[in-house]
Amino acid sequence: MDLEFLHKLIIPAQTKIVLLVMDGLGGLPLEPGGKTELETACTPHLDTLASQSALGLTIPVGPGITAGSGPGHLAIFGYDPIKYEIGRGALEALGVDFELGPDDLAARGNFCTVDDNGLLTDRRAGRLPTETSRELAVLLQTVRVDGVEFFIEPVKEHRFVFVLRAPGLDAALTETDPLKTGVMPLSVNAIRPEAEKAARLVNCFVAQAGRLLAGKSPANMILLRGFAKFPIVPQYAELFGLRAAAIAINGMYRGVARLVGMQVLDVAGDTLADEFAVLESHWHEFDFFYLHVKKTDTCGESGDFAGKVRVIEEVDGLLPRLLALQPDVVIVSGDHSSPAILKSHSWHPVPTLLYSKYVRSVGDTVKFGERACARGSLGVLPAKHILPIALANAGRIAKYGA
Amino acid sequence: MDLEFLHKLIIPAQTKIVLLVMDGLGGLPLEPGGKTELETACTPHLDTLASQSALGLTIPVGPGITAGSGPGHLAIFGYDPIKYEIGRGALEALGVDFELGPDDLAARGNFCTVDDNGLLTDRRAGRLPTETSRELAVLLQTVRVDGVEFFIEPVKEHRFVFVLRAPGLDAALTETDPLKTGVMPLSVNAIRPEAEKAARLVNCFVAQAGRLLAGKSPANMILLRGFAKFPIVPQYAELFGLRAAAIAINGMYRGVARLVGMQVLDVAGDTLADEFAVLESHWHEFDFFYLHVKKTDTCGESGDFAGKVRVIEEVDGLLPRLLALQPDVVIVSGDHSSPAILKSHSWHPVPTLLYSKYVRSVGDTVKFGERACARGSLGVLPAKHILPIALANAGRIAKYGA
């Protein structure tokens, strides 16, 4: 079933949907047969909601595929994450909250060190302090090439985001980073004819950057890789008829939400409670809310099982504030799994709960977790199927055929 | 897996398959956590069969999509209901048991009222009595246009089916119904060049119809919409090697069965027992039987939970007659869900049982219903996957590869 088919059946409604994404929610037990992070957490409110919900396990990209946060979010937002690929450069730009437009070509940049012959001696310029990097970015911003805008956004240490803005740029470019020392940085080549304009502009920029940075050793040159444009994705308002809002603190998640046409709301602080407060204060303005919890993933990636448990429990404690708003449909899920035992994202399907008045609920008492979800009435399903089911439960899809 | 792939693996066998479709079988509890219609029904025979069967939940069209009976049946017959779309006009023709052929273009018709200036004053001609409508249909049948046949089949009150029969007709036509009063009925326009012949013939018919009906106020004009041809669907005999029979009382179901090449058998009365009697009397003539139960859906759509329960129990009481025939494979399912609480079709997956000697059965005692099916060995699967599984259980699919 493609989005075009779904789009034709969309009908208006007054209902509200909340998508609560705990990043990297899915987990694994510390020892075989034990409990996962979610199963360990004491979550009375989630458990009660789960008993009134349909449960399932969602597959973000495909069987055995470990999803990055970009594809994982696109999937839970209802899109095919293989069709709509977000390239590395675009992701890096999202990460610093840069508002990429359709004319923008983004890349990941490094400050690096070259010797007098122009040969690379350090691909990371000694991981120079972020502060120095920031000053050099201001310097690079003075480069001028006719008919085009450049943006240099510092990320951390030697890393920055490079964005080239001009009509008609194509991202099919080779990279300048040779991935080893002792050789010169490469020129950018167009992989197809449409990219020749972009190649010429990037090479022109790199040449000027090299001249500006000469003498600034160790950061006396730059490397660029992962050239990418933002994928053009059908927008939530047009596609699903939803006025959608995103509540997220980190740049990348705000960026992916913006990509699909959600309005990204400001969050006053950096706590979960701050995010829930935004949900409450904007409740009457939107049909759909995406609320992102980052720290489940942070703990998973750093191997902090107990920390991940505590974050889940903190979310559980805030859940009553969400439910008090009386949403018609609530989805609680993750964009991928991040088991603490693996200290990384993983391929495991993600425990998912879908609440509405019209689901076939479990009925009995249930502990929200991987095992309960594996036996749920939603089955094991692609993550992109969750949004259509949510829309159906919200009375927003017409009958197909008579 | 497409039908062409499956077709190449089909091998002959002497086995018999019965597909028992309880229309709108899937349901919801009256209160959260309660029992659905099927779970409420006392169904000892279905339960015993279920314990010897593989269980699952079938998705007729796609996640979150509420299927009409046309697409729902195509799916359980083994076809992709999005690829083979049955348009409105074609469905209406099925409903009055009109045998649509490949040269036929069908539309939904209304008698309507226009004033002296030809402006619409009532799009339904005061919902004139079916009897009057029937007489006017006979009158319209006298229209003559060179090289083409017309059929006017009364439906109910002001509604009729209009069929245009000629080679080379295309259904890409605009409609004549402006969907409001105070304006003139519209001419039909071709949306693409191939439809110009059809547009010309329809406009010619409508002009003559208007002249014939002048003075027959309130039914002094007609409106046509939902132009559709019957989709060309691979036929059961050729595709699956099955001599297939349909046992259904209502026109639309008989029509969809005819569409896929089933032989539609006459049913002497209008009771379920009459349908089972047809199954018995034709048992030796066919490999595959589709038996349709209408009233589960009728009760679901009218909100009659208890009535739906009773119909399911009536089917259960007749099941021993079916089983006494010793079919090799039995499927019990629905074309979609129709929960009484929603008074309409719904998107919920449909409880499905597949019996043969070769399934991984539940083994234990089981109550046939949505919850048991959610935990079944078939999982949650597209409805179109059921037929291949049935064919396999019937020894009708060869090995793929060595």
Image: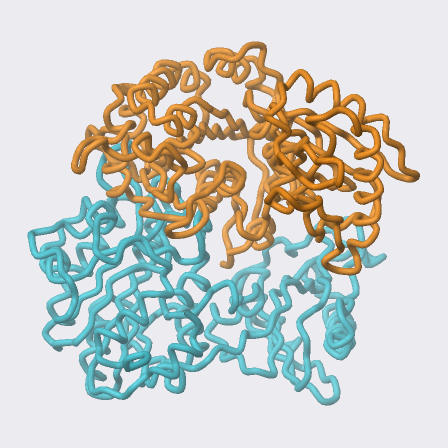
Chain colours: A orange, B cyan
Closer-to-camera residue (B174/A104): A104
> Residue A385, image x and y in percent?
45, 46
Q: Residue B191, located in which quarter of the rendered image?
A: bottom right
Q: Is residue A250 left or right of residue A390?
A: right
Is residue A232 something one can see in this rendering?
A: no
Q: Residue B78, located in which quarter of the rendered image?
A: bottom left
> Residue A291, image x and y in percent?
50, 25
> Residue A325, image x and y in percent?
46, 18
> Residue A159, image x and y in percent?
63, 29
Q: Which residue is at 29% across, 20% downward?
A: A306
Q: Quadrant of the C terminus of chain B?
A: bottom left
Q: Outermost residue, right direction?
A: A146
Q: Outermost residue, front direction?
A: A116
Q: Is residue A65 left or right of residue B88?
A: left
Q: Is residue B339 above or below residue B188?
A: above
Q: Which residue is at 61% across, 36% downward?
A: A91
Q: How many marks?
A: 0
Q: Which residue is at 59% across, 41% downward?
A: A240
Closer-to-camera residue (A27/A264): A27
Q: Is residue A365 left or right of residue B199?
A: left
Q: Is residue B219 left or right of residue B307?
A: right
Q: Quadrant of the N terminus of chain B?
A: bottom left
Closer-to-camera residue (A44/B77): A44
Q: Which residue is at 40% across, 86% downward?
A: B238
Is residue B284 something one can see in this rendering?
A: yes
